Amino acid sequence: MQPTPVPRDILIVGAGIAGLASAISLAKELASSVPDLKISVFEGAPGLSASGGAISLTPTAQNYLDKLGVLSELNRMGSEAGIEVDLIELFSLRSGRKLGPLKFTDENGFGYGGYKGRRVMRYALSRAMLSVIQSHLPNVSVYYDKKVVGGTTTDSSVTLSFEDGSFATGDLVLGCDGVHSITRTRIVDPGNRSEYTGISFIQSVTDAQDLSIPMHFNQTAIHLTRHSSLLTSYCDPDRQKIFSAAILRVNEHLIERYQATSKSDCPEQASMKMSIRYLVRTQFAKSSLPSIRALLDHTEDWALYPVYQVRQRGKWHKGRILLLGDAAHAMPPRDESAAYSIEDALIFTQIFSRNLHAPLATTFQQYESMRRDLVNKVFDASRRLWQSDLDKGLFPGHVRELMSPVHLPPGGCVPGPTTTTASARQGIPAATHQSFSDLSVYSLTREFQGEIES
């Protein structure tokens, strides 16, 4: 029996974090063993988007980016490199009382495993990843304005069809096109559409020099209320830009109206912007912290980003197509997806490179057996906490559970030990090495309920 031909023409749908990480990881790993490798990345947007705001990179995510050669590229980007975060300061929004820190460093100020957290604009991270591809990986090509509308898979090949009428045929497709994945909903698992969680980010970026009052935090802060939270963070080394994100429940009808008016420059658009601003100010402008009041008074242009999830235990692969990142397992609000997406790319690359002559079905099954149980456990835990607290009118609690280790180290297939630091204040949990993000922070509401309301 002859071995299965090695897939040499890989098609990746989506040029977000998952797609670019997959392209970089596969190109680096397979360069010597598959000399005629060709990787094509197709993105539906007309170009690199400047939207998405500033994302939080956990120490784990920074570790992964370093392995891909992206972190060094990011560090060379000057003011766009983001700001390293030693700790997140927690405040009661109402009283202004400082509740304590969540640390990304040990007692000596060193990052876990050599890495701290980082706040960086999403487009800057994408630029760093594209730079790695353009400078070092000639066998990777990225194509914009190529929106996938369907595809077919056979025993020997897979073909993608695009909105412009063109086609692309290869040996393997990785669907990395996010929570609203066309690869998932039209090819791999038709009907498995994304679902709104009830929570949204409403975010903006402000010039610090335009504010009359200096901010009350050093790098990043979370301001907790009973039903919501407000993140404020510098997102550049010189602390010239302040990223703000209100994390709160938003009615789905308002989201539909916002999305409808944002597609064109219509009179309703200005009215909707005023409504979004009013929503943020209603929730947070009564803070006793003068700098928060000044920030909200000055900031007028807010963008609304609903948080979606994908139905649990859906299909991850079909024929020669595999879903990675949010396309496969966007889950109830818990952690941002960057570390999960990069981790998916690294683990699939490991398995694929060790089984180049195996049938793709075998490789996909091995990958799923390694990832599925972990994802299901995280999904179940998040959903139980989330639904329980929504039923009670509170945001998710039990931060220690939410900060439990959920990532696999890219160098192996078993979870590594959890490293924590002593808290600066008894009762304040410290961030774990493995995972901590914005969507975990506001779960502190129940943990600090008495102090938030005092």
Image: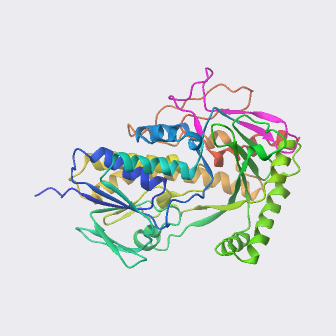
In the image, residue 436 lies at what x, y percent?
Answer: 60, 41
- Name the outermost residue toward the left: 1
**Residue nearest the observer in this picture, 450 or 20:** 20
Task: Please tell me whether residue 241 belongs to the stretch shown in magenta.
Answer: no
Q: Is residue 225 left or right of residue 397?
A: right
The residue at the point 85 percent across, 48 percent down is: 293
Q: State which region is magenta.
A: 89-118
Q: In which quarter of the image is residue 109?
A: top right
**Residue nearest the observer in this picture, 163 or 208:** 208
Q: Could you tell me if residue 65 is visible in this image? A: yes
The residue at the point 40 percent across, 68 percent down is: 188
Q: Is residue 446 left or right of residue 325?
A: right
Q: In this view, does 391 lie above or below 219?
A: below
Q: Is residue 248 above or below residue 210?
A: below
Q: Is residue 223 left or right of residue 140?
A: right
The residue at the point 43 percent across, 68 percent down is: 183
In the image, residue 120 lies at what x, y percent?
Answer: 59, 45
In the image, residue 162 lies at what x, y percent?
Answer: 40, 74
Please tell me whether the stretch drawn in magenta is mainly helix, strand or loop.
loop
- Name the outermost residue toward the bottom: 165
Q: In which quarter of the image is the N terminus?
A: bottom left
